Structure formats: structure tokens, C-alpha cells
Image (tube, rainbow, N blue to C red):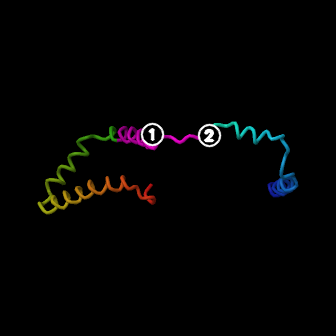
Amino acid sequence: MNDKHFDDFLRLQLQGSSPYLDDGDFSARLLASLPAQQRLNPWLEKLIVLLPVTLIAALVLRQFSVRELIQPAYGWVLTLDMHSIVMLAVVMTACLLIAPVVFIFKPKFLF
């Protein structure tokens, strides 16, 4: 029996089956006896996601040599002129001021 014949057979069997099987209200009683679904605390939901991500990121960073990461960054900072340092400070300050506002007002499209 090839797949086409089996698909046709299965389609006929499913279309010909009765839409309702009488179970003596067993399904309704079972669903009524189930406990109501409880939502976790939003902070706990975020912690469940952030904790493993942080641990995995720490394990990945542990594999890198600290010298190989810090030395190029330190060299890059030494080559900056005053204008670039001021612009970097302005951008970092703006990010630090905007981030709490975004998290306080929680726009729907971000979360």
C-alpha cells in the first residue's frame, strides 16, 4: 500500500467517523475537575530565562583568554581622541537614561 492509497483510506475513515462519541459526560467532568492554570510571577518567569542564559554566557566567556579580550579594547581606548571619548560618554549616558524608561512603561511591541 503506497502513501497515496493510505492517505485516501485515512481521509475516508476520518470523514466517515461520527463527530461525537458519547462518553457519559466523562470529558466534561474531567475538565471541570482539573485545577485552574496558575501563572508564574513575572519576575520568576524572567529569572527562569535569564539565569540559564547568564550561566551559559559565563561559561562561554570563561573559555576566552582575558588578555586576548582586554588588550585590544585597551589599545582601542588609547587611540581615541577627546571628541570620540565625549561622544561615547554621551551615548552611554543616553542608553542608561532611556533603558529604565523603556522597562517602566513596557511598550507592547518590545515584550
Q: Mark 1 or mark 2, which is nearer the start of the sequence?
A: 2
Q: Position of residue 61 (x, y in %)?
A: 33, 41
Q: Position of residue 73 (x, y in %)?
A: 21, 50
Q: Residue at x 45, y 58 (%)?
A: 108
Q: Position of residue 44 (x, y in %)?
A: 45, 39
Query: What secondary structure is found at the residue carrying circle 2?
Result: loop
Q: Residue at x 79, y 39 (%)?
A: 26
**Mark 1 surroundings within 10 Å by alpha-carbon count, few (fewer than 14), some (14 through 19), many (20 or more):** few
Residue under circle 1?
44
The amino acid type, in three-letter code, at marker 2 is Ala
Q: How many marks?
A: 2
| Residue lying at the far left of the rendered structure | 82
Residue under circle 2?
36
**Horizontal arrangement in the rendering, residue 24 relative to residue 65 (left or right):** right
Query: What secondary structure is found at the residue carrying circle 1?
Result: helix
Stretch in magenta: 37-60
Q: Quadrant of the C terminus?
A: bottom left
Is residue 17 one of those drawn in magenta? Answer: no
